[in-house]
Image (cartoon, rainbow, N blue to C red):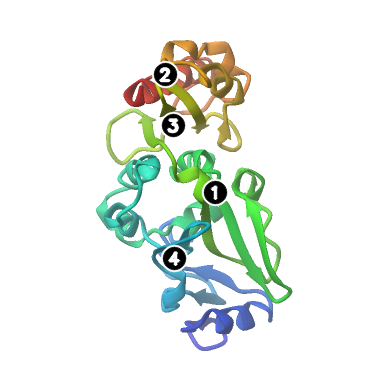
Amino acid sequence: MDSHSYQRPDSLQGALDILATGGWQIAAGCTDLFPATKRKQLEGPMLDITSIAELRGVTGGKDGLRIGAATTWTDIIRADLPPAMNGLKLAAREVGAMQIQNRGTIAGNLCNASPAADGVPPLLTLDAQIEVRGATGMRVVALNTFVVGPRQTTLQSGEMVTAILIPKASLAGVGNFSKLGARTYLIISVAMTAARITVTDGLVTQAALAIGSCGPVATRVPLAEAAILGKPPSAELITDDMVAAAIAPIDDVRADAGYRHISAAELLRRTVAALA
């Protein structure tokens, strides 16, 4: 590819300047981009962001944690993160094989906007916010409003995700993640669940529960969260009806909607029980 179809800037501002000219496809790990390409090479113009050091890594601050957009799943697995982010670490180990984990990026997982994106449920339990930059400046969007449908986000032309922000208040408690599929490795899930719970003096003081692969977007489960809040931790308080009210599963080659309703509720109870 020539400079008109491929650019690899080494600064964020350089990338934003290129994006502002229009028509560029952002490339990082390319673990979703390559499978979607029917030719032997990616079709330009491609903006490769893998040389921008400030887009990679996890850093802490007084307001919480910042995860650079080009941070890989292997980076997350190896990072020294608080127990609240155990769910995200477990999800990172489920994203394809080790080669995919070495290349795939956390922002790529979000921007691909698959209903079965492993990173979304645990990030929802962490109240993740998405930092977006473009020629007009920077904006921060809650994850639950950033992904709006299958393969759909609120990114505008000339914008890119630069970081995932985890608020300090969401770093309390312990997280967990579970995934159900036809086998235990290298699968697209039938259902997946994530939980983050804080227990103080024997009572649940924070509860964040989420489900993925059971609707057009992953979602929190507010009725189930309310059911366990203020009580001794017990997964049995979570009913099938509470889960059914939050999800909208479909029939597909992996499972039918009825099975997803049942399995999502049971999987969520198991995810919470492991923490309780």
Contact between labelled residues 3 and 2, with CB atoms less than 8 Å apart:
no
Question: Dot 2: what SS?
Answer: loop
Callout 3 crowding tier (Cα within 10 Å): few <14, some 14–19, many ≥20? many
Name the residue rendered at 48%, 11% in the picture. 237
Name the residue rendered at 63%, 69% in the picture. 133
Res 227 visible: yes
Query: Which label sits in the foreground, 3 or 1?
Result: 3
Alpha carbons under labels 3 and 4: distance apart: 30 Å
The residue tagged 1 is 128
The residue tagged 3 is 198
Q: Amino acid at mark 4?
A: Ala
Give the mark nearer the N terminus: 2 vs 3: 3
Q: Amino acid at mark 2?
A: Pro
Give the mark nearer the N terminus: 4 vs 2: 4
Give the mark nearer the N terminus: 3 vs 1: 1
The residue tagged 2 is 233
Alpha carbons under labels 4 and 1: distance apart: 16 Å
The residue tagged 4 is 70
271 sits left or right of 244 in the view: left
Closer-to-camera residue (10/181): 10
